[in-house]
């Protein structure tokens, strides 16, 4: 199984994936903390549900059973590996 | 006598703490379906099944004991006993959203680690079931080591069980469960993993999540349809305010006219009669008639909040807000400010970034609040011709829309400037939990509207009545001698003051009557309408109904003056309550002073430019 890592920002919509790692150094301390509080962590299932606008609007993604809105810069720091089935 | 035991309601944002607080105490705390409805502590009392009283604290929702916004700090300080003037709670009710277990449990674990007696309210269990999630609350209690009570706060389910458990917890000498799990004091990542394990252990079965919310969101958050829908929602809201509010407003106005007529019939002509009819009834009536429109405005805002749509609007607006250095989160307080800037400014507490929050507070008064409606309606009705520029598009409506747009554009420009100067800083992010859609509950809406009506009528009955009566007195005394060529208004105390100040406002086209109305309108914008009513009622001795007043305005004001007056009200900070709440929210006089000065300068310049341009155009 050759899983490729990509950022949440580039994950196709409705493609289920698992958080592989988060580039904490690219986030400010409060951003990183808030991200953890919202449940982002290695091994958690994630999926992009909606993208606001062409042109850099936020994305809405499912994390656990919660839906969370994120700006793309933050989504770019979250690395995911797409689930092979689903 | 020992004080009643203190119990704190704590939990993640939007877990339903305020609904539970209301269900337990019978209070009428505002509830809404977006994270951050409660921004300060609220206390209430309830009786345990054995009759003992308990003091219950409703605290702002937070994701952890490591606060990132001012409202979250309150919560941490209370549960750790660090809050000045507050004793350490005797027990904690942790409110957990049953559909979001793994996330909410992490904070629950942190709270249990504090060592206080804890009971978990597994709230919104009905929504979790509807969502296809079956939970085992006994298993959850076993894993957590504290009692767990399934509740549905809005339907008052599980409240009695919760009170009974609470009675055991706050009984002196009762042994509190102290789990000695070393994981509890671990870092956030470890806690998160433990929370997930517990959630899995407590979940009996689970089907894919939130079908309804996903279906609605695929429209509401769509790059094209979502934006279109937002505009339709806002359009319908403003249309309803202006058109549905007109008929009941007329009914209220004629009610006040009837009352004034009645007083005139039964009382002989005297100073007292003039005070009652020209001062109190004309002044208060001119303002109270806007109650229907204000309530319609609040109705829409409350529905948007309660349904969960407000967060979607914030999501859609984030890109635009980012372009002026704010986040989508600021959209919620700003939209609320269209109803009233005071609750709008208070709800900025959910904004984590301090600079972001300050900027939002400073521009909130630029949103056209409902208190400006009476002013706009009167002046537009009197001086803008009622003609149609396009089929179904009247000029008067267009001017009204233009004033709203001026406010928004002004706010954006100011935000842009502030973010590059006084509130300079790195652009903050936008990270927000998006709640499930919920049907707003009639009871919550009714309570919300009722409390707004109460505030408004109280203000009309006190501040506005008082300022109009004072103004009436200042306009009526000293009484002008018979056969004097000087008019009563010019001869009076108020008239003399206004005549002295008027030169400062003459360059921007304001006459003495406007200056007279602006001074008492510092208390509240609506007062200017009441004040103009009083000025003209005294000057024309008789005639306090709106048609006559509009006629008087039409005769005495040029169109250029009227437009300048409207522009003044787009920007001028004429509202004591807004200034007071800004002082409270920014802890000092520095920012309210800054806000008032920049808004006055803006108002003066905008009104002046409008006047000069309109005069040049020959209006």
Image (tube, coloured by chain):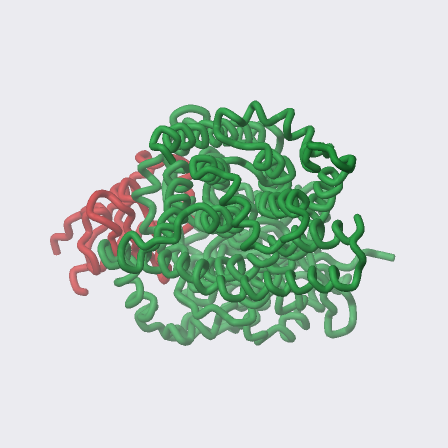
Chain colours: A red, B green
Q: Is residue B257 above or below residue B566?
A: below
Q: As drawn, which residue projects farthest toward the front?
A: B483
Tell me if B238 is positioned left or right of B588 in this view.
Answer: left
Q: How many marks?
A: 0
- Quadrant of image for the N terminus of chain B: bottom right
Q: Is residue B503 above or below residue A43?
A: above
Q: Residue at x 78, y 68 (%)?
A: B52
Tell me if B5 is positioned left or right of B398 in this view.
Answer: right
Figure quadrant of residue B436? bottom left
Front one among B238 and B224: B238
Residue B378 appears in the figure: yes
Q: Residue at x 70, y 41 (%)?
A: B471
Residue B150 appears in the figure: no
Q: As drawn, which residue projects farthest toward the left?
A: A2
**Residue A35: where, in percent of width, then height?**
38, 46
**Residue B520: where, in percent of width, then height?**
65, 39
Front one among B253 and B367: B253
Q: Is residue A8 above or below residue B522?
A: below
Tell me if B519 is positioned left or right of B396 in this view.
Answer: right
Q: Residue at x 61, y 40 (%)?
A: B521
**Residue B438: where, in percent of width, then height?**
43, 68
Front one among B213 and B222: B222
- Quadrant of image for the C terminus of chain B: top left
Front one among B301 and B171: B301
Q: As drawn, which residue projects farthest toward the right?
A: B1
Tell me if B175 is positioned left or right of B148 in this view.
Answer: right
Q: Residue at x 40, y 76 (%)?
A: B130
**Residue B45: where, in percent of width, then height?**
72, 62
């Amino acid at each position: 199984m050759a899983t490729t890592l990509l950022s949440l920002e580039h994950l196709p919509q409705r493609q289920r994936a698992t958080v592989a790692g988060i580039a904490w150094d690219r986030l400010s301390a409060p951003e990183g903390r808030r991200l953890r509080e919202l449940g982002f962590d290695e091994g958690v299932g994630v999926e992009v549900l909606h993208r606001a606008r062409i042109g850099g609007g936020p994305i809405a993604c499912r994390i656990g059973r919660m839906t969370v809105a994120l700006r793309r810069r933050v989504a770019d720091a979250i690395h995911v590996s797409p689930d092979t089935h689903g | 006598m020992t004080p009643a035991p203190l119990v704190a309601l704590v939990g993640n944002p939007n877990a339903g703490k305020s609904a539970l607080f209301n269900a337990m105490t019978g209070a009428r705390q505002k509830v809404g379906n977006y994270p951050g409805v409660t921004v300060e502590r609220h206390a209430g009392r309830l009786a345990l099944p054995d009759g003992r009283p308990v003091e219950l604290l409703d605290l702002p929702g937070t994701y952890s004991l490591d606060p990132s916004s001012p409202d979250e700090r309150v919560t941490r300080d209370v549960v750790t006993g660090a809050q000045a003037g507050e004793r350490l709670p005797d027990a904690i009710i942790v409110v957990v959203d049953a559909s979001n277990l793994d996330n909410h449990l992490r904070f629950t674990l942190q709270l249990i680690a504090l060592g206080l007696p804890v009971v978990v309210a597994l709230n919104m269990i009905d929504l979790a079931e509807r969502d296809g999630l079956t939970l085992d609350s006994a298993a959850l209690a076993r894993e957590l080591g504290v009692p767990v009570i399934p509740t549905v706060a809005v339907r008052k389910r599980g409240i009695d069980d919760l009170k009974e458990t609470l009675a055991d917890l706050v009984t002196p000498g009762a042994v509190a469960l102290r789990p000695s799990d070393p994981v509890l004091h671990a870092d956030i990542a470890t806690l998160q993993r433990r929370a997930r394990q517990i959630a899995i252990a407590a979940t009996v079965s689970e089907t894919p999540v939130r079908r309804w919310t996903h279906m609605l969101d695929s429209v509401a958050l769509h790059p094209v349809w979502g934006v279109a829908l937002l505009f339709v929602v806002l359009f319908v809201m403003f249309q309803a305010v202006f058109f549905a509010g007109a008929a009941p407003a007329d009914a209220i106005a004629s009610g006040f006219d009837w009352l004034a007529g009645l007083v005139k019939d039964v009382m002989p002509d005297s100073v007292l009669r003039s005070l009652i009819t020209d001062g109190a009834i004309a002044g208060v009536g001119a303002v109270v008639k806007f109650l229907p429109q204000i309530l319609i405005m609040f109705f829409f805002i409350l529905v948007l909040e309660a349904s969960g749509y407000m967060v979607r609007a914030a999501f859609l607006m984030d890109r635009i807000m980012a372009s002026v250095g704010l986040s989508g989160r600021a959209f919620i307080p700003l939209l609320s400010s269209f109803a009233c800037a005071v609750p709008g400014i208070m709800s900025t507490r959910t904004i984590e970034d301090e600079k972001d929050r300050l900027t939002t507070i400073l521009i909130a008064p630029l949103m056209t609040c409902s208190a400006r409606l009476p002013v706009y309606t009167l002046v537009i009705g009197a001086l803008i011709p009622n003609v149609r520029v396009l089929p179904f598009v009247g000029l008067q409506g267009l001017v009204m829309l233009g004033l709203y747009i001026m406010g928004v554009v002004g706010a954006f420009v100011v935000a842009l400037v502030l973010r590059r100067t006084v509130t300079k800083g790195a652009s903050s992010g936008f990270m927000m939990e998006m709640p499930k859609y919920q049907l707003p509950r009639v009871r919550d809406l009714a309570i919300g509207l009722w409390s707004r009506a109460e505030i408004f009528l109280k203000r009309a009955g006190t501040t506005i009545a008082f300022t109009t009566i004072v103004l009436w007195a200042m306009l009526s005394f000293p009484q002008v001698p018979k056969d004097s060529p000087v008019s009563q208004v010019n001869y009076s105390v108020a008239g003399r003051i206004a005549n002295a100040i008027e030169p400062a406002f003459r360059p921007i086209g304001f006459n003495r009557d406007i200056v007279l109305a602006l001074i008492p309108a510092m208390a509240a914008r609506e007062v200017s309408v009441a004040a103009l009513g009083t000025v003209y009622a005294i000057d024309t001795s008789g005639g306090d109904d709106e048609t006559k007043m509009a006629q008087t305005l039409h005769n005495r004001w040029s169109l250029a003056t009227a437009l300048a007056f409207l522009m003044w009200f787009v920007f001028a900070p004429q509202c004591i309550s807004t200034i007071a709440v800004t002082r409270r929210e920014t802890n000092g006089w520095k920012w309210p002073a800054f806000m008032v000065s920049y808004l006055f300068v803006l108002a003066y310049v905008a009104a002046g430019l409008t006047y000069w341009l309109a005069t040049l155009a020959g209006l």
